[in-house]
């Protein structure tokens, strides 16, 4: 019998996913979920046929340079691939796939949760109660801002942006968006969405700004100090995409000075490090990259990664080839 392909998974995945991997491959799983150091990652590149990495692996040209002759596929567990040097992979003849669609709804839920948490000051309220500081209801305690009727500006109207737009409509918000171009007419009509070609103009006009575009060299620090300064003082910023799209130091300054009202962040430029000045601010919600963190979603992501691996090894074009 031919040997099974060697599949190396860099992190612990849900049991159902690992069981399928162990059944179908010579799978090296990560039982205790200790992230691989650079030398371990390089060694894994040297002996694998397929690697299933995640956002916590930095796969740059140097790591890709360690790929052995058998490594032909990086089947990323996750939709964002900014942690992988795609050009270096291509140059080395290594295909890369991701897991779109299956995490769209969960991530949009998380973005909506950030909006509600920030605008209604829910984290502040919970911290006060748990800290023993609640002395009873008061008419002017922890007053947030109404989201019903607010203008939401979505940067990046892809799958997740559109799913957030649907939620926002349900909460009575107006949907505005900036994108490479207008979305198709059916979606624009469904969301009653207003397209802004000029990002700066949209930023100045909205009450809540949500980052939903991928991180790339073009979107790195897209929300710079200059752009953040365009926001209205009552505005909120939320990010469930990638931390590097916002200049975190500039955001912290704007939150601290009151130039904007608040923010909700699920992602950070130097994860797991969080800009020190954000940690001390009350008007920012800070979550540990929970966007797709449902058991259902993580199983679906694993199965989607497996579908890509199986198609690739069968000589077919994987459904999510980048
Ligand atoms: C994933 C994410 O959990 O898919 C993405 O891009 O940001 C997260 O939801 C993570 O990337 C796993 O690799």
Image (cartoon, rainbow, N blue to C red):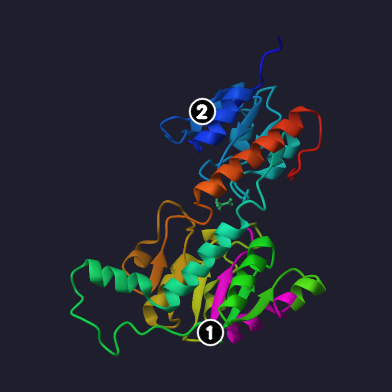
Question: Residue reaching furthest top?
Answer: 1
- Residue nearest the observer in this picture, 164 or 274: 164
Q: Which of pointers 2 and 1 lies earlier in the amino acid sequence?
A: 2
> Going by the image, does 179 lie left or right of 135?
right
Residue underneath mark 1? 148
Question: Dot 1 lies on which element?
Answer: loop
Please identify the residue farthest to the bottom as the structure is shown.
Answer: 139
Give the percent coordinates (x, y) of residue 231: 53, 82
Quadrant of residue 49 within the rendered picture: top right
Query: Where is residue 287 drawn, in percent x and y?
Result: 42, 60
Looking at the rendered structure, the secondary structure element under dot 2 is loop
The response on whether ligand 1 sits within 8 Å of label 2 is: no
Can you see residue 20? yes
Q: Residue at x 54, y 83 (%)?
A: 207
Locate residue 226: give its quadrant.
Answer: bottom right
Q: Position of residue 17 (x, y in %)?
A: 56, 35
Q: Which residue is mark 2?
A: 29
Image: 310 above or below 1 = below
Quadrant of the rendering where the N terminus is positioned:
top right
Displayed quadrant of residue 23: top right
Magenta residues (range)? 190-214
Marks 2,1: beta carbons within 8 A: no
Q: Decide: few, some or many residues near mark 1? Use Cα within 10 Å; few <14, some 14-19, many ≥20.
A: few
Relative to residue 98, is residue 236 depicted above or below?
A: below
Q: Looking at the picture, tell me which residue is in the foreground, 241 or 268.
A: 241
Quarter holding the C terminus?
top right
């Amino acid at each position: 019998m031919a040997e099974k392909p060697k599949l190396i998974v860099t992190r612990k995945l849900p049991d159902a996913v690992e069981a399928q991997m162990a059944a179908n491959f010579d799978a090296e799983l990560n039982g205790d979920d200790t992230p691989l150091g650079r030398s371990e990652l390089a060694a894994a590149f040297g002996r694998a046929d397929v690697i299933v990495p995640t956002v916590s692996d930095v796969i740059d040209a140097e790591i890709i340079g360690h790929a052995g002759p058998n490594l032909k596929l990086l089947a990323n567990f996750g939709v964002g691939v900014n942690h992988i040097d795609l050009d270096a992979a291509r140059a080395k003849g290594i295909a890369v796939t991701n897991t779109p669609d299956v995490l769209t709804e969960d991530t949009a839920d998380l973005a909506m949760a950030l909006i509600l948490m920030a605008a209604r000051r829910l984290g502040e309220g919970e911290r006060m109660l748990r800290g023993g500081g609640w002395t009873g209801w008061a008419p002017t305690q922890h007053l947030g801002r109404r989201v019903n009727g607010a203008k939401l500006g979505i940067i990046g109207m892809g799958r997740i942006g559109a799913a957030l737009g649907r939620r926002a409509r349900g909460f009575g918000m107006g949907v505005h968006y900036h994108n490479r171009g207008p979305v198709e007419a059916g979606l624009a009509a469904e969301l009653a969405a207003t397209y802004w070609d000029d990002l700066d103009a949209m930023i100045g006009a909205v009450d809540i700004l949500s980052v939903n575009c991928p991180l790339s060299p073009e979107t790195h620090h897209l929300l710079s100090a200059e752009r953040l300064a365009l926001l209205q003082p009552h505005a909120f910023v939320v990010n469930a995409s990638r931390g590097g799209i916002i200049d975190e130091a500039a955001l912290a300054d704007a939150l601290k000075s009151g130039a904007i009202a608040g923010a909700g962040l699920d992602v950070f430029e130097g994860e797991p490090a969080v800009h020190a000045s954000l940690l001390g601010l009350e008007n920012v919600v800070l979550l540990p990259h929970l966007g797709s963190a449902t058991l259902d979603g993580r199983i679906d992501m694993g199965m989607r990664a497996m579908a890509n691996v199986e198609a690739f090894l069968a000589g077919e074009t994987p459904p999510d080839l980048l």
